[in-house]
């Protein structure tokens, strides 16, 4: 189940990256950076799930790598079909934005509230990092 879910997840990430580059290079870079930073902990977690499921380290790494390659397939699909289907980018970009909002709303923000919610220094650091991330995305979009 983990491998199948991760395969579809990475394929969608690839579609998002491909569509983002069709809008502009800065938007593509911003999306790629966001997805990479999202994928690193995701893939580490998937690796742990595969190890817990009985796979050897080598097999788990290999399978994780193979599922990650589906993101490249997603990019290729987005680039090929965007030239053949009018309006595909107009669909994929809001889909990408919604995906990022969903990840933030369902994964990241609740996680921030779990640990030391009453520690003011940690809360301030989290807020600074959150605002810094928004500023980086805005700068990348303005460079367009």
Image (tube, helix red, strand yellow):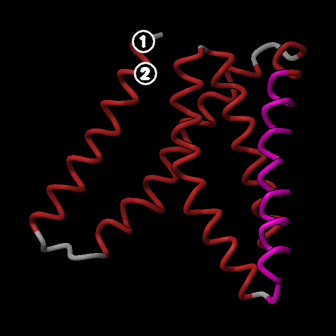
Q: Which of these two is toward me, 100 or 73?
A: 73
Residue 76 in the image, given as x and y percentages of width and height: 85, 29
| Magenta stretch encompasses residue 62 | yes
Q: Mark number for residue 118?
A: none
- Of residues 128 and 78, the one nearer the viewer is 128
Q: Residue furthest front?
A: 58
Whether label 2 touches label 1, CB < 8 Å? yes
Q: Say left or right for 60 vs 116.
A: right
Which region shows up in magenta?
A: 54-79
The part of the image, by quadrant, that contains residue 86 is top right
**Could you say whether the residue bearing mark 1 is in a helix, strand or loop?**
loop
Quickly name the residue at label 1. Answer: 143
Give the Cα distance between marks 2 and 1.
5 Å
- Find disc 2 in the rendering and name its residue: 140
Q: At 12% across and 72% down in the image, what residue appears?
A: 119
Residue most toward the left? 120
Number of numbered labels in the structure image: 2
Question: Where does the image place residue 41, in percent across and percent down from the top left?
Answer: 55, 62
Residue at left 40%, top 29%?
137
Q: Position of residue 24 (x, y in %)?
A: 59, 14
Describe residue 55's horizontal placement relative to residue 100 as left or right: right
Residue 126 in which image quadrant: bottom left
**In this rendering, would 75 be left or right of 90?**
right
10 Å neighbourhood of mark 2: few (<14), some, or many (≥20)?
Answer: some
Residue at image location 20% in from the left, 47% down from the top: 128
């Amino acid at each position: 189940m983990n491998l199948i879910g991760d395969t579809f997840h990475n394929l969608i990430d690839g579609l998002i990256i491909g569509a983002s580059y069709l809008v502009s290079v800065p938007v593509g870079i911003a999306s790629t950076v966001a997805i990479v930073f999202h994928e690193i902990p995701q893939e580490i977690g998937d690796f742990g799930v595969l190890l817990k499921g009985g796979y050897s380290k080598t097999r788990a790494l290999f399978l994780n790598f193979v599922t990650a390659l589906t993101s490249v397939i997603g990019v290729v699909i987005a680039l090929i079909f965007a030239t053949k289907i009018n309006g595909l980018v107009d669909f994929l970009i809001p889909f990408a934005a919604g995906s990022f909002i969903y990840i933030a709303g369902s994964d990241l923000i609740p996680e921030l509230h779990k640990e030391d919610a009453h520690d003011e220094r940690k809360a301030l650091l989290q807020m600074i990092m959150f605002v810094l991330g928004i500023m980086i995305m805005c700068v990348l979009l303005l460079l367009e």
